Structure formats: structure tokens, C-alpha cells
Image (tube, rainbow, N blue to C red):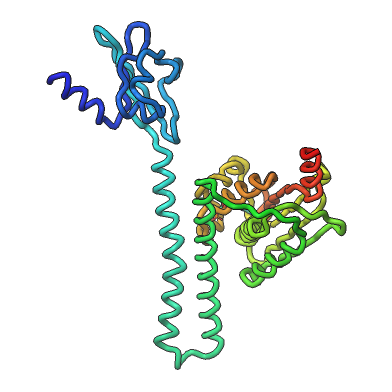
Amino acid sequence: MNKINFEKILENLDEAVLAVDYDNKIIYANKYFCSLFNTNSELVSGKYVYDFLPEKTDTIVIKDCTYKISKINDEFCSYFYMSVVDNQLEKIYSDFISTVSHELRTPLTSIRGFADTMLLSYDKLDKDQMHKFLTIIKEQSNRLIKLVENLLSISKIQVQQSNFVYKSINPKSQIEKVIEILKNQYPSHPIELKSQADIQNILADENKFQQIMINLIDNAAKYSYERGAVTVRIANSSQNENFVSIKVEDHGVGIEPENLSRIFEKFARVENHLTRKTQGSGLGLYIVKNLVEKMGGKIFVESSTELPNSGSVFEVLLPAASYIAQSKKVLED
Ligand code: ADP
């Protein structure tokens, strides 16, 4: 094979290839290598190979992909080959497709089924049956709306385009609105709100704050057994007076300690007695964490599975409006 053909093959290879001289200086880098490191062959040429690759291990993680590095020594130079052994992005993408198709198909099938039944037998159905079917159609439509909103949120988070409209808001009245919505969806779960009397306003985006609370309270009811109570507690944080603490407590299935950090990852659903029965995309907590942190807050979770209803407590800390106003003033002065 002549040199030109050989170089063409290397250029179009789906593996990164480098050739280095005896001093470990790069004498050739193919297109794939240059695109991985956002560079070009002229810039790379003459650089030390270990400025790019690890010296002590034979794997490297770049842009969610793990590459295995193999080295072959030749008479005149050495070649480094980097081939993909684990592509997290591909996995995330295929998880995404299967979760979203399942999450879309399930409520749509149910909506179509109940609408069909009503159309075919509307003259035979009594008022109660009609009411029951329409309620299911409404609940399933709400699920679809929540999924679409969550999907829009992650795409915005990914492209960093989320617009936040900050206002001084009263957390108690916002949470009351959210509980009103969710009470209809979970009639068998008592959802209680307990608030300190002199609670401070927070500086947050109203819609995003509601989205955070909907996801947390919805999970608390969803991962609890029938009639499991959910309590939302609002207080000025005892740890830091500049923050307001909102705790969502349930007595549900709980989360094993080893899964506590995983639940905030995109598409992470942890197996429990109720995950198979309940619908979900594994996006809720990922979005919640992102929104809370973008608004200058923090989220914590405590949970246990020791007893059947040990339950979980999710705590969100958000900055008080007066604290932000003060900090701004200090900066301006
Ligand atoms: P989804 O509920 O759609 O699966 P989330 O991101 O909201 O996705 O939650 C991720 C996982 O964390 C859930 O699948 C569930 O296993 C676990 N989880 C979240 N909240 C609770 C809770 N209050 N109690 C027990 N498990 C929970």
C-alpha cells in the first residue's frame, strides 16, 4: 500500500491514532485525535505525547467516553491507538429513547383506550363511569404535560438557556398552590404544610420554584404506600439565617444509602417496591438539583430503608430575598 492510501485510512479511522518519535514527541496525529482535543495536526506536531495522554494508566475519559490506549513500538517510532471501550453518551441516549418512548406510550395508550370506550359505548355508560374515565384521561394528560415540561427543562439546562425571572416570593403561598394541585392527583395521601410564622421571602423564579416543589411532593406521594402522609415544613434555616429551609418528608419506601447520590443523575430510577408500579422518567430530581443550584441553593436528602416506612426527607435551602438584596448593596457600595 502506498503512503497516500495509508494516510487516508488513518485520517478516516474511528479511532484516535498518534505516532511519536523516540523522545515521545508527536510526529503525526489523525483527524479523530485532533477533534477529541479540539486542535489541529500542525498545533499538535512536536508536542510531548503525555501532555495529552496519561502516563500511568492506559485509559482516558474524554467527553463522556472511555478510551483504551494501546501502544505499539515500531523500528522508527511508536504508535498510540485510542479506541472507545465505554460510551456513556450512547448509553444515556439509548436510555433516553427507551424511557421517553415508554413514558409517552403508557399514558397515550390509556387515554386512547378510555376515549374509545366512551365513544363506542357512551349511551350505555352511567354518570359515575363517565366521571371515572374522564378523571383517568385528565390524570394521564397531566402526566404527559409533566413529562414534556421536564424534557423541555433538561434541554434548556443542557444548552444553558434557562431564563430565570427572579422575584421576592413567599414560599408558603407558592407551596399551598402546589399542594392544591397535587391533592387532586393523590386523594388518598394526606399532604400537610407546616410553616414557621415569620418565614422570610425567598428570591427565586416563581415557575421554577413550583416545578421544584411539584417534583419533590409528587415523588413523596408516589413512593409512599396508600394513605402515607406527606409533610412539607418551611422554616428559616437554623444553620444559616440567610437561607430558608423547605423539607418534604414522607414515610414511604425510602432509598438505600448506596443509591442516594445516584438519584440526582439524569434518567436514574432506583428499583424499589413502587418504581415498577409508578410512572417516571428519572428526570425529576436531576432537574430539581439543577434548578435549586442555579438559584443559589442546595439540596440534601436523608433516607432509610430499615423499616418498611422509614421514608425520606428532601431538604431544599434557598437564599432569602433580604440576604440577596443586602449582598447586592454591599457589592454596589
Ligand atoms: P422518577 O420519579 O421519574 O423515577 P426522579 O428523578 O424524580 O425520577 O427520582 C429518581 C429516583 O429516586 C426514583 O426512581 C426513585 O427510585 C427515587 N426517589 C425519588 N424520590 C423518592 C422518595 N421520596 N422516596 C423514595 N424514593 C425516591
Across and down, in percent, residue 209 comes to 67, 56
Which of these two is toward me, 226 or 111?
111
The answer to whether residue 249 is above or below residue 187 is: above
Which of these two is toward me, 243 or 256?
243
The answer to whether residue 266 is above or below residue 21 is: below
Q: Who's the residue at 41% across and 13% down the image?
A: 48
In this view, which residue lies farthest toward the front? 333
Q: Who's the residue at 26% across and 30% down the image?
A: 13
* 76 sits left or right of 282 in the view: left
Across and down, in percent, residue 50 comes to 43, 15
In this view, which residue lies farthest toward the bottom? 123
Across and down, in percent, residue 88 comes to 43, 39
* Residue 252 in view, yes or no: no
Quadrant occupied by the C terminus:
top right
The answer to whether residue 144 is above or below residue 134 is: above
Which of these two is toward me, 156 or 126?
156
Q: Who's the residue at 62% across and 49% down the image?
A: 291
Quadrant of the image occupied by residue 1:
top left
* Residue 110 in view, yes or no: yes
In this view, which residue lies farthest toward the left? 1
